């Protein structure tokens, strides 16, 4: 899962000032003439809250989001969420406690 997340993170559209400040690295370009068509997920950024977001988060005065009209990105995001839920081990707080009398 970590390798998948690292690979996806290299494709996020990041603000130029975050690159200049050393907060992140530039977005890795996908080679080829059909590069946009081959991206599994497109995450955009802006200072203003997006109007048509499927999922959005505000971080360091910027909004990052997946557009609700971008079916490929929504499908990839949903698939990642399924993978995360499958890897979730959960806690043991709900298990019954067995006690043995000692007296």
Image (cartoon, rainbow, N blue to C red):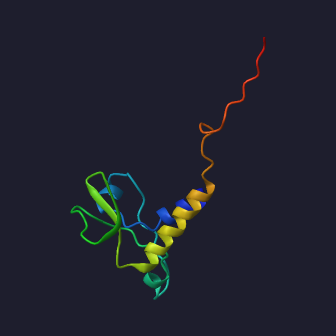
Residue at the far bottom: name it.
33
The image quadrant that residue 86 belongs to is bottom right
Q: Is residue 49 above or below residue 59?
A: below
Q: Nearer the viewer, residue 59 or 19?
A: 59
Q: Nearer the viewer, residue 41 or 22?
A: 41
Q: Is residue 48 left or right of residue 45?
A: left
Residue 37: % across, % down: 46, 84
Residue 102: % across, % down: 78, 14
Residue 57: % across, % down: 34, 57
* Residue at position x 50%, y 65% in the image: 8
The image quadrant that residue 92 belongs to is top right
Residue 87: % across, % down: 62, 55
* Residue at position x 25%, y 53% in the image: 61
Q: Which quarter of the figure is the C terminus placed in?
A: top right
Q: Nearer the viewer, residue 74 or 10?
A: 74
* Residue at position x 41%, y 64% in the image: 26
Q: Which quarter of the figure is the N terminus placed in?
A: bottom right
The image quadrant that residue 46 belongs to is bottom left
Q: Is residue 61 left or right of residue 44?
A: left
Q: Nearer the viewer, residue 68 or 99?
A: 99
């Amino acid at each position: 899962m970590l390798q998948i997340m690292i690979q996806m993170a290299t494709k996020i559209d990041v603000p130029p000032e975050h690159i200049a400040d050393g907060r992140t690295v530039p977005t890795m370009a996908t080679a080829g003439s059909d590069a946009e068509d081959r991206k599994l997920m497109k995450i955009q950024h802006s200072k203003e809250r997006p109007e048509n977001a499927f999922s959005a988060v505000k971080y360091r005065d910027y909004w990052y989001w997946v557009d609700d009209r971008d079916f490929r990105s929504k499908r990839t995001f949903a698939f990642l969420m399924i993978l995360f839920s499958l890897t979730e081990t959960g806690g043991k707080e709900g298990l019954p406690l067995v006690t043995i009398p000692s007296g």
